[in-house]
Amino acid sequence: MVASDDEVTLKVENLRAFYTSKKGLVRAVNNVSFEVRKGESVGLFGESGAGKTSVALSILGMFDQLSRYYASTAANEENKRLWSLKDKARKKGLTSEEMGEDLPGVEGHIWFKGKDIVALDEKEYRKLRGNEITYVPQGTTKSLNPYSNIEEQASEVLWAHDEDSELVELQVMKRVLQTLDLVELGDVDLRKGMKPSQFSVGEDQRVLIAMALIPNPALMIADEPTTAVDIGLQNRILEAIQIVHDELNLSMLLISNNQGTIAKTCDRVGVMTAGHIVEFGETKRVLNSPGHPFTRAFIMSNPSMELIRKIREKGLRIRGIPGKPPDLANPLPGCPFSERCEYVQDICREKLPEYREIEKDYWVLCHRYEELPEW
Ligand SMILES: Nc1ncnc2c1ncn2[C@@H]1O[C@H](COP(=O)(O)OP(=O)(O)OP(=O)(O)O)[C@@H](O)[C@H]1O
Ligand code: SF4
Ligand SMILES: [Mg+2]
């Protein structure tokens, strides 16, 4: 990709992440590549089960841990064998290909500020996570402690990571209050002593965003930051995200299956289905004139008024996505969208397409891009 290393905060290269399950390996992330430049906000947009959260967990160094945990609870001998093989491969620095067998966990490269962090051990990852890379998890508000007031919780974030520094209490408090103010919590001085139950869901969400900002990270990952809140609150949360993005010149990775969220907050976006990014480019380019049949179908399944008008003008049909997403434990041999695509041909079923750069900074994964009707 094009930006030079010092302009890039995060560069994900050929990332794959496989879970173990009762049904075998679940290929949740397949050869995913993208970068987040300094001060840029990049979105991952796509249907449920597409692998968006799995990409985030891989970047945060939490994927293997979680997958192993589920494997151990399932007590499946084959999965235990696979994880023990993975441990051997890791020690020797070998890939699945070099071991001659597909292995669970994360493989590929995750360059963060120029350093490949994919093989860091947990101790090293702990220095990054919650500090240089912060995370607002999906289904969030349960991650706040109900018994402690928000000022205490927010300042714990800083103390936890700055044991060696000379931060004094007053500085911590100042930083916490400034950040809560930045996400427009309102009446911060008055409300900092309140517990999470005294806030609305949207306010809790903003507290979590503030907590992810307090350590002054190089990258903030927010996973579905506006699910489970009404439209008015969604807009306020998105405004808060935009404000912090603009004011702090922060690099962000924003995950959502909501087109409006992506349109409002992201400079560039990758569209995901079945563990693949099928289209990547500037948000306006991708959302206004999508080139990939999946993106078109996904946007059409929940069209904006503007899009409905455009579809009618062009004589196109409004249709959702037929059928179910493919089973990632039994992935399709060719294009991941081939079972559901209205333009499918034999080649699509047989061969996975290669990424093609259609124009500068715009990639599509489709055999038939040039032949598709104009959008
Ligand atoms: N612990 C697990 N073990 C096995 N498979 C899993 C596990 N967690 C997720 N998966 C599977 O991995 C795939 C990708 O899931 P992921 O949560 O990354 O998708 P997502 O795009 O974030 O979806 P959503 O929009 O619903 O949050 C799905 O098929 C999911 O069922
Ligand atoms: S490669 Fe074929 S099946 Fe896949 S999106 Fe393109 S036209 Fe459809
Ligand atoms: Mg998710």
Image (cartoon, rainbow, N blue to C red):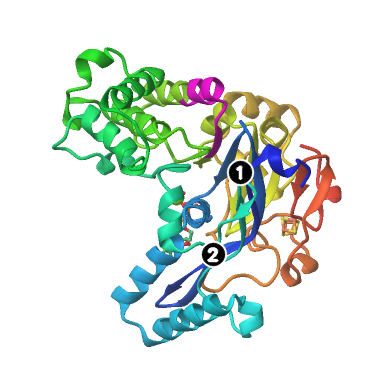
Give the label, 2 or 1, closer to the camera: 2
Three-letter amino acid code of the residue under disc 1? Arg
| Residue at numbered disc 1 | 319
- Are there few (<14), some (14-19), or many (20+) residues within 10 Å of tag 2? some
**Helix, strand or loop status at disc 1:** loop
Asked if residue 276 is positioned above or below residue 166 in the image, the reply reads: below
In the drawing, does residue 364 fall left or right of residue 183? right
* The label number, if any, that marks residue 141 in the structure image: none
Location of residue 207 by image quarter? top left
| Residue 131 visible somewhere in the drawing | yes
Residue occupying the point 24% across, 14% down: 189
Asked if residue 167 is positioned above or below residue 126 in the image, the reply reads: above
| Residue at numbered disc 2 | 119
Q: CA distance from mark 2 to mark 1?
A: 43 Å
Query: Sequence order check: which comes first, mark 2 or mark 1?
Result: 2
Ligand 1 sits in quadrant: bottom left
Magenta stretch bounds: 241-253
Q: How many marks?
A: 2
The reply to whether the residue tagged 1 has its Cβ within 8 angstroms of ligand 2 is: no
Location of residue 79 by image quarter? bottom left
Residue 308 image point, x, y percent: 63, 29
Three-letter amino acid code of the residue under disc 2? Ala
Residue 92 image point, x, y percent: 57, 79
- Are there few (<14), some (14-19), or many (20+) residues within 10 Å of tag 1? some
